[in-house]
Image (tube, coloured by chain):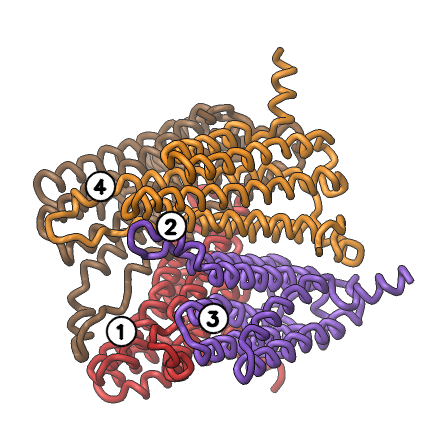
Chain colours: A brown, B orange, C purple, D red
Amino acid sequence: MVADQGSDDAGSAVAPTLRSETSRLFSFSDGVFAIIITLLVLDLQPPEVPRGELLHALVERWPVYLAYVTSYLFVAVSWLNHRSAFHRVGSSGKGLQWWNLSVLFSTALVPFATSVVSSSVQQGDRADERAAVALYGLVGVLLTASWLGLYHHLARHPDLLNAAVPRGFFPAERTRAVVGILGYALAALVGFLASPPIALVIFLLLPIFYALTSSGLYELRRLRRAHG
Amino acid sequence: MVADQGSDDAGSAVAPTLRSETSRLFSFSDGVFAIIITLLVLDLQPPEVPRGELLHALVERWPVYLAYVTSYLFVAVSWLNHRSAFHRVGSSGKGLQWWNLSVLFSTALVPFATSVVSSSVQQGDRADERAAVALYGLVGVLLTASWLGLYHHLARHPDLLNAAVPRGFFPAERTRAVVGILGYALAALVGFLASPPIALVIFLLLPIFYALTSSGLYELRRLRRAHG
Amino acid sequence: MVADQGSDDAGSAVAPTLRSETSRLFSFSDGVFAIIITLLVLDLQPPEVPRGELLHALVERWPVYLAYVTSYLFVAVSWLNHRSAFHRVGSSGKGLQWWNLSVLFSTALVPFATSVVSSSVQQGDRADERAAVALYGLVGVLLTASWLGLYHHLARHPDLLNAAVPRGFFPAERTRAVVGILGYALAALVGFLASPPIALVIFLLLPIFYALTSSGLYELRRLRRAHG
Amino acid sequence: MVADQGSDDAGSAVAPTLRSETSRLFSFSDGVFAIIITLLVLDLQPPEVPRGELLHALVERWPVYLAYVTSYLFVAVSWLNHRSAFHRVGSSGKGLQWWNLSVLFSTALVPFATSVVSSSVQQGDRADERAAVALYGLVGVLLTASWLGLYHHLARHPDLLNAAVPRGFFPAERTRAVVGILGYALAALVGFLASPPIALVIFLLLPIFYALTSSGLYELRRLRRAHG
């Protein structure tokens, strides 16, 4: 309800410091990403076991380490995407601020969802694992839907972009977000109704897709055309 | 007792780096806001339940999620307000530093108050809920009173502002802060003496008011005059 | 053993980006201060009490709130001191980096010492309170001794300072640090051997002294001469 | 699989803001380092002991304090190394981004490994201590191997460096990383098979080696030649 005004409130009155205002969006977002990616490590705690059992307990915890790696990759790729998108943004506005806050909001849910998955693998039964992967998938849908909103906002407000950014860039990025929405929704469904391990494989594949396409689909197509 | 000196101690002797000094106020404040908004997520933990109960436990926790959303919105709006106010500030001083530290101090109490409210809803009785919403309301009063102090300081020290900022801007902002003080005080009273749910509704409405007016009352009035 | 080389290793080879190197010292330090000041709030947790006891439990916890306020003030003043000192620094070097890391190291101990004091007040006996205030005093000594090292390093390496900084500034700052070392040592002794409450009063007074003198003793003397 | 493309995706299209893109790598990394170094202090908690036992419990915890100091030194030296390396970097790229994310990933494991070691010293038997030092050594190998990857990437992509950086700088840095890999691997083996205390001594010595050589082996050799 407060989005979509396009150019920033203060843009007219206080033009000379406009750039410094974009820089605060960066420093706040970088701070949030840095905290989220580091909070993940709080799930790694010394196991509380009887004397002499430490080695065994550390080895047995491999699903926790795998969950840590997957989520680290997920948040790292989100940050790279953020950097890549905002690299092309010249000025912000209320709408963009709120879409950015939505992305940060849903990214902040990743450590929680990770923690639920790794505790269900360790202590839960099959029904718990189904609930946990469904939750993780839902958080993935929320996150990629926020990205879709952000990309769509930038596709519709080219005035916010740097002059050198080609018009087709952000419209093409929407496709990347839609792939994620469908992928996480599929994984949540498959995991909840059929097989949690298949969901976990999809959860690991999606960040790899985002890592491989983090230059943007538009740039990738341009490069393919240029080389072929 | 250390406030209100107006211009900064170092202003005279080390003028060339004055801007970098304002930038540290930004980076410190952005860091604090980023941490506070991310700490909220620490209240979301995997529920410790018997095997097979995870889905039920996750669904039953909806008040915790609602509290998370409300407080995220509250802190996000505080950050937008902060950005919008300091966007208009050209140089700082001891007084402004301490008012800023007061705002950060009271914002840092939001996750604590949120946590008390959501645990009272889950585990407490009616009396506990009354105490919890009263605490949340008090933190809200403290926070909006800090904003009042900050706006009042900037209204009285126009020398700290960017040249392009109209004189009426910060005097008008004081009204927004007073609305919050009265609103949170009312919610605390109503919640403590009569109905906690009514207080929760007010707690959700106030950040929306701040989001809608985050351009500043002065700008909104100017726009209304320009369009009518 | 790695300190006191004066100018930075990379100074000769990569001069053009020297300023950006100082800016990373700022952003890292601002990050650490922001985290420390926000970690303090983690000591504020919803009390785990039987139903209907929340209000009583919240009120009874006043020493925890007082400890929070005192330590927030302590860390806030440290940050203001840091800003005020490094505002006058033009380039860094290994020695300055390590003194800065010492200041951050000892500042990071403040939340721990605060937590020990507030838990001893709530759950301990007189002997525990004595141990706790002695620990807090020791952390205070460590912190002010780090500041002494930093000020002494800057007093001996005027080549690191901005051109406009008067020669007498950092030599005079050493006095402020020595006041802190003596004050915290005295408080630790008095608290451990005689009266913990007297120690707590000194702990509250010392940050106020630093707040009042945060422009630097040199500037204060200059102002007094100028006005009288 | 996404590394080694050399220059950044966005480099061609959005050249004017290239510097700001490097600055986000700095602010994100500084944020992560600041959080990691401050998370270490969360291991310091008020001991939960019967009334009157606080002083004794605080003194008995010296291995926790030693672990805190060792790991603070370790992370501080990592940050100094990071600053020193990226000080020489003029532009980034996907490969460099991922190597940087690997360094941050393995640095984030240090608080976990520290925590395991200090809890094994306090509560475990000899077998637990062996497992704990082996884990700490493995994390050390992972961290220094990430540094080797980063140094190797910069040695092979001189186009990413500032013009003034001598060609031999990063090839020589690889030697420093290899010393760490061998040192931590040796410590893990000796600690696991023979004597945990010897491993702890090596763990303390390696950060000191990195602190003493943080100007880079190339610079140290150059200085030695210049002076002899």
In this rendered view, identify the residue nearer to me: D39 or B67.
B67
Question: The numbered mark 1 sits on a residue in which chain?
Answer: D
Mark 2 residue type: Gln
In this rendered view, identify the residue nearer to me: D205 or D215.
D205
Which residue is identified by label 2? D5
Mark 3 residue type: Val
Which residue is identified by label 3? C117
Quadrant for the C terminus of chain D in the image: bottom right
Question: The numbered mark 2 sits on a residue in which chain?
Answer: D
Q: Nearer the viewer, mark 3 or mark 2?
A: 3
Task: Give the image location of residue B42, x and y in percent.
Answer: 35, 52
**Residue C224, located in which quarter of the rendered image?**
bottom right
Label 1 crowding class (10 Å Cα cut-off): few <14, some 14-19, many 20+? many
**Mark closer to the chain start, 1 or 2:** 2
In this rendered view, identify the residue nearer to me: B114 or C102.
B114
Question: The numbered mark 3 sits on a residue in which chain?
Answer: C
So how many labels did they put on this image? 4
Task: Give the image location of residue C125, x and y in percent.
Answer: 42, 76
Image disc number at residue D135: 1
Q: Could you tell whether B143 is left or right of D183 in the image?
A: right
Helix, strand or loop for disc 4: helix
Q: Could you tell whether A220 is left or right of B163 in the image?
A: left
Q: Nearer the viewer, mark 3 or mark 4?
A: 3
Which residue is rendered at x = 73% and y = 61% of the image?
C215
How many angstroms separate mark 3 from mark 2 (CA)? 54 Å
Depicted A142 relative to depicted C66: above or below:
above
Helix, strand or loop for disc 1: helix
Which residue is identified by label 4? B60
Which residue is rendered at x = 63% and y = 78% of the image?
C181
Helix, strand or loop for disc 3: helix
Helix, strand or loop for disc 2: loop
